Amino acid sequence: MVPAAAVSRPDSRPVTRSLLGGVGLVLAFDAGGAAAARFFGFRYTLLLFGTYAIYLFVTFWAARRYGVLAAVAFGAILGLADATLGWVISWLIGPGRPAEPLTVVSAAGVVAVSVLLGTVVGILGGAASRFIGTPRSTS
């Protein structure tokens, strides 16, 4: 019988670091965008296009490195982080505050839609990675 420590398992640290890097990128964009919107007085919602561009870049890259399924998971997790931590960051800075009082149901709806949209962008990023350029080897 082979001891459990001798069994070879894939190393998940690079995937975790990549995912955390993508989340950090989205949250940094949220913070910088919220500060800029407050300072310059433009609508914070205009930055949604930039947010989804980051999702697309990160999920495209994840598909190249780890496969299409990873890109879809990255997209969902980016959406979750953006709708929770990103929302809190922008709320604290100012422009992320909703105009009307927020209920648990409406907040959960926003999170669900954000995760769904992140998943869709993950699918698009994964699909694009199959058609654009040549994939990189993970080894």
Image (cartoon, rainbow, N blue to C red):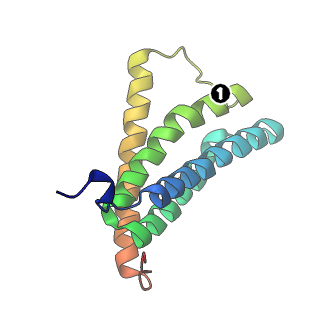
| Above or below 84: residue 30 | below
Number of other residues with Cα within 10 Å of mark 1, as a class: few under 14, some 14 to 19, many 20 or more: some
Q: Which residue is mark 1?
A: 91
Q: State left or right for residue 132 relative to residue 9.
A: right
Q: Residue at x 43, y 31 (%)?
A: 110
Q: Nearer the viewer, residue 36 or 86?
A: 86
Please state the horizontal and vertical placement of residue 126, each as a whole percent of the image.
36, 67
Q: State left or right for residue 11 relative to residue 4.
A: right
Please state the horizontal and vertical placement of residue 115, each as a whole percent of the image.
39, 42
In the orientation shown, which residue stands out farthest toward the bottom?
Answer: 134
- Mark 1: which amino acid? Trp
Q: Nearer the viewer, residue 43 or 118?
A: 118
Q: Quadrant of the C terminus?
A: bottom left
Q: Residue at x 33, y 54 (%)?
A: 5
Quadrant position of residue 1: bottom left
Q: Residue at x 48, y 56 (%)?
A: 13
In the orientation shown, which residue stands out farthest toward the right?
Answer: 39
Quadrant position of residue 99: top right
| Above or below 17: residue 34 | above
Q: Nearer the viewer, residue 55 or 99?
A: 55
In the orientation shown, which residue stands out farthest toward the left?
Answer: 1
Q: Tally the numbered discs.
A: 1
Q: Nearer the viewer, residue 135 or 125?
A: 135
Q: Residue at x 53, y 55 (%)?
A: 17
Label 1 sits on a secondary structure element that is: helix
Please state the horizontal and vertical placement of residue 73, each as a whole percent of the image.
36, 52
| Above or below 104: residue 47 | below
